[in-house]
Image (cartoon, helix red, strand yellow):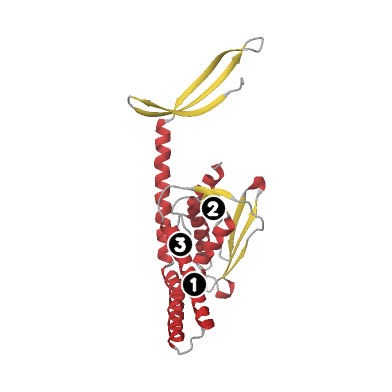
Amino acid sequence: AGVPIEYEGELNLPGGRRYFHSNLIPMRDAAGRIHRIVGACMDMTEQKFAEATLRRSLDEIAHLNRVAALGELTASMAHELNQPLAAILSNAQAASRFLASESPDLAQIRECLTDIVADDKRAGDVIRGLRRLLKKGESQPSSIDLNDVVSDAIRLVRNDILLRNTSITFEPFSGLPLVRGDRIQLYQVALNLIMNSLDATAERPPSDRWVSVRTTESEGGGVQLIVEDSGKGVPESDLARVFEPFFSTNGAIFHCVLPVAQQAAAASANEP
């Protein structure tokens, strides 16, 4: 077609596989005919290896961050599981008593079984949330509804929010477009941003502890997740450092929230 070509490729050489980046530019004569092609080829092997190492390191940090987050949620998770499990036991015992009677009330038994199914699903939601946090592996991009991801994150920390005497509101944007990215990473971002806000409001009086979460559509068909809280905020002198790994204003050393968020957002933006 007579237009410049830019592409990446790989070669299997005696010394091993090499990666390269090439640029080809057609050159035309006075009549406009292509009479030669000028090209440049750059060896990208070391850069590719460095990028792969960086991705593995970031995935490991993200996984450790999720595991550390579970440490803060232990009491909340125990409560979230104990409630539906206790309800299942209670309904199962009630159904057994109804069945033992001379004239079992089928309507009451049916109601008990319906409640058992609902509580089982509730416990399953908690366990699936834990599995998402503990899952380790490479990113798996897919089409994601950010509203669903944020709802799942809020549901996971619901009891922790109550224990902290904090109010939370979620305003999902109606008709929010799907985004391309890794669900686990985005789930972690939403969860950690919310937990950071909960930490930030801890020093406020209970009557003034609030977290606001909302989604909205941005220009170009993108989406935004906005988390605000009643905490004191980040000092202006520290703003330049908020994307540094392990930086914290509240003494919590495990939070790599913004660096991981930045990585996940960049990965989602680069997905086709």
Q: Are marks 2 and 1 in contact (CB under 8 Å)?
A: no
Residue 137, percent from left and from top: 41, 50
Instruction: Please name the residue shown 51% across and 72% down the image.
Output: 118
Q: Which residue is mark 3?
A: 128
Nearer to us of marks 1 and 3 is 1
Q: Which residue is mark 2?
A: 239
**Distance from Cα at disc 3 to Cα at disc 2:** 35 Å
Q: Which residue is mark 1?
A: 117
Q: Quadrant of residue 33?
A: top right
Q: Earlier in the sequence, mark 1 or mark 3?
A: 1
> Residue furthest toward the front?
102
**Distance from Cα at disc 2 to Cα at disc 1:** 48 Å
Q: Earlier in the sequence, mark 3 or mark 2?
A: 3
Nearer to us of marks 2 and 1 is 1
Q: Is residue 153 above or below residue 258?
A: below
Q: Is residue 112 above or below residue 262?
A: below
Q: Is residue 43 above or below residue 95?
A: above
**Distance from Cα at disc 1 to Cα at disc 3:** 16 Å
Q: Amino acid at mark 1?
A: Val
Q: Amino acid at mark 2?
A: Leu
Q: Quadrant of the N terminus?
A: top right
Q: Are marks 3 and 2 in contact (CB under 8 Å)?
A: no
